[in-house]
Amino acid sequence: AQSVTQLDSQVPVFEEAPVELRCNYSSSVSVYLFWYVQYPNQGLQLLLKYLSGSTLVESINGFEAEFNKSQTSFHLRKPSVHISDTAEYFCAVSKSGSARQLTFGSGTQLTVLP
Amino acid sequence: DVKVTQSSRYLVKRTGEKVFLECVQDMDHENMFWYRQDPGLGLRLIYFSYDVKMKEKGDIPEGYSVSREKKERFSLILESASTNQTSMYLCASSFSGQVPRSYTFGSGTRLTVV
């Protein structure tokens, strides 16, 4: 069975600083990878996804993630964060051939400080 | 704007009560999911459904059941609520297909069992 590990439960960072949220997965088969974001008192929203092709994927609000097959990682990065990026971020994986289910990591709370 | 609507934002129920959590989507999605979200544990899949009247157990189905009589509605049932079922419950839906589609989440129902 696949699993997802988010190495940091809390990441505080100052505004305009860079940030990296780490995600590692375990699976012996091809996978599809996702990052979701949850703002306070809301449901989860898709931030970006890797299905195939270029290993670097970007979101519309400046986040990017790189699929690294050899290190089984899909870390999320942003070069300069804003106060409005404060949220909980979830990494998720779905393995090829089991397209309906996502397995989520435990989440990383990103807090951007002024 | 497409939506997944969960009928209640907050619920307080007594131990032993039968509890119904309702979820409705207006996107004609085939797949629907119920997750519970707990601090430090991320999202854990309770049940999912890939068609009307079809259901499959997720990772933590014990103490729960589901019903999907219509494509747009997926209900989660706690037959006899217990305090360890106090949690945030999230409903999600997606299109079917070999390549996983993005989930659309509802805003969640925070259930407290006293």
Image: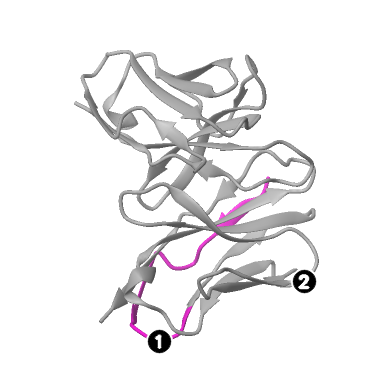
Look at label 1 and name its amino acid: Ala
Going 48% across and 42% down the picture, which residue do you hit?
B105
Tell me the element at label 1. loop
Between A57 and B13, the residue placed more toward the observer is A57
Same chain assignment for discs 1 and 2: yes
Checking the image for residue A17, the label placed there is 1
Contact? badges 1 and 2 (CB < 8 Å): no
Within 10 Å of the Cα at label 1, are there few (<14), some (14-19), or many (20+) other Cα atoms? few
Instruction: Tell me which segment is drawn in magenta.
Output: A1-19
Q: CA distance from mark 1 to mark 2?
A: 26 Å
Look at label 2 and name its amino acid: Ser
The residue singled out by tag 2 in the image is: A54
Residue A87 found in image quarter:
bottom left
Q: Does the magenta-highlighted stretch encompass residue A16?
A: yes
Residue B113 found in image quarter:
top left
Q: Is residue A82 above or below residue A5?
A: below
Q: Position of residue B31 (x, y in %)?
A: 63, 31
Q: Is residue B104 above or below residue A89?
A: above
Going 49% across and 43% down the picture, which residue do you hit?
B1
Q: Chain of mark 1?
A: A
Q: Chain of mark 2?
A: A
Residue B15 found in image quarter:
top left
Disc with the residue nearer the chain's start (1 vs 2): 1
Q: Is residue A27 visible?
A: no
Tell me the element at label 2. loop
Q: Position of residue B48 (x, y in %)?
A: 58, 29
Going 62% across and 14% down the picture, which residue do you hit?
B53
Between B112 and B30, the residue placed more toward the observer is B30
Q: Position of residue B50 (x, y in %)?
A: 66, 27
